[in-house]
Amino acid sequence: MQTRSIKTKELSALLDQLRAAGVEIIAPARAPGVGRAVVYRRVSGFSDIIMGVQPRGTLKEHFLPASERILGWRRGGAHLELLEASTDCAPRIVLGAFPCDAAALEVVDAVMGWDYRDEFWFNRRQATIVVSIACDGGDESCFCHAVGLSPGSTRGADLMFVPVDGGFQVEVTTGRGQAWLEEHQEYFSEAGDSTQAVAFQERATTRSSQRPRPHMESIGRWLKNNFQHDYWDQLALRCHGCGACTMVCPTCHCFDLVDEPEGPEGGSRRRNWDTCQAATFTLHASGHNPRPGQGARYRQRILHKFSIYPARFHELLCTGCGRCSRVCSSGMDMLELLGEIHDMASITEPTTSPEARNEP
């Protein structure tokens, strides 16, 4: 794989050319309307894009929409016609994805292709070139370093941009990225001196590594052995059960299927995001709820990410983006909670000491 560079002016021209060719461009940009928060959305050109600011939402909604039609039906007398929803996706490019968000796509690939291949998800994945941008190290809520990533992680990205004066150094990370760059090579130039790019990534790594680093393997073992621990009831006193954490999480993927009428002769089956933090998530038609309290529901969230998913797919269901901590109305910080579990695990595993958390 090669390293190239691209000037801001050339990148702007490239995006104009892509848009003219019918390619959808998704990038961090101000949301329309009230608030104007930075989100991942479709943009019309480089002037819309805000590089280096982590969007409030994630890329997930562009691959697993919050609500989508997966089947339709039409009735005519005794006859019922089923209407398949298209799984086609036009060519797209994601530009400026944060490393934690790009990695999340690859993490979720495992469950989407597990016992059933989700064609909606994978067709969108196949149609999309993902270009990430190296992070500057994030804020105090970020903990990518604790889950095996870094501000310069290239996982899930076809190319990575590293900011330098006047543009970006471009690192090609996949064969798809290489082919795409060669297709548009007239906009790129030789990489030249990499001093600025290296310095940027070193500063980001240093900044990120100064935060605590809980030992994930010990945490996983503690979770497996402490299903009935009092800790879950303590967390329940703080958690409101609003589900905001799951809505902004790049790897949460739970959904519900709902049949909705659309007039007297037809309707559609829709897939809608759902959350394990809601009391109705596991409510049975009989009235029984196997997770009747918020402690059990919050336990499910932690176990799913750091025990259940790793046991099934051999990787964590978390990329350390920190969004769950930022949006929590009760101030529950994921890195802090993992540190608490780490410390409880150290009681039974002496080798997992507080020093292993890399406390500053």
Image (cartoon, rainbow, N blue to C red):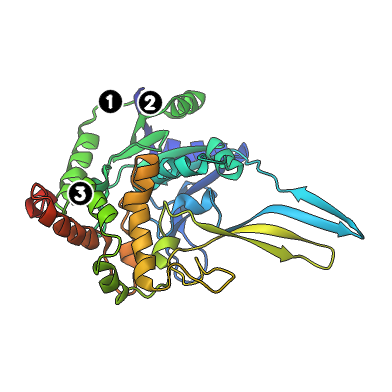
Crowdedness near tag 2: few (<14), some (14–19) or many (≥20) residues, C-alpha within 10 Å: some
Q: CA–CA distance between discs 2 and 3?
A: 47 Å
Above or below, 4 against 61 in this view is above
In this view, the residue in front, 242 or 211, is: 242
Residue named by callout 2: 189
**Label ID, residue 192:** 1
Left or right of 270 in this view: 311: left
Image coordinates of residue 318 in percent, x first then y, are 34, 50
Whether residue 97 is visible, yes or no, is no
Q: Quadrant of residue 263?
A: bottom right
Image coordinates of residue 132 in percent, x first then y, are 38, 41
The amino acid type of the residue labelled 2 equals: Ser
Q: Quadrant of residue 89?
A: top right
Image coordinates of residue 147 in percent, x first then y, are 27, 46
**Label ID, residue 116:** none
Answer yes or no: do the residues labelled 2 and 1 have beta carbons within 8 Å?
yes
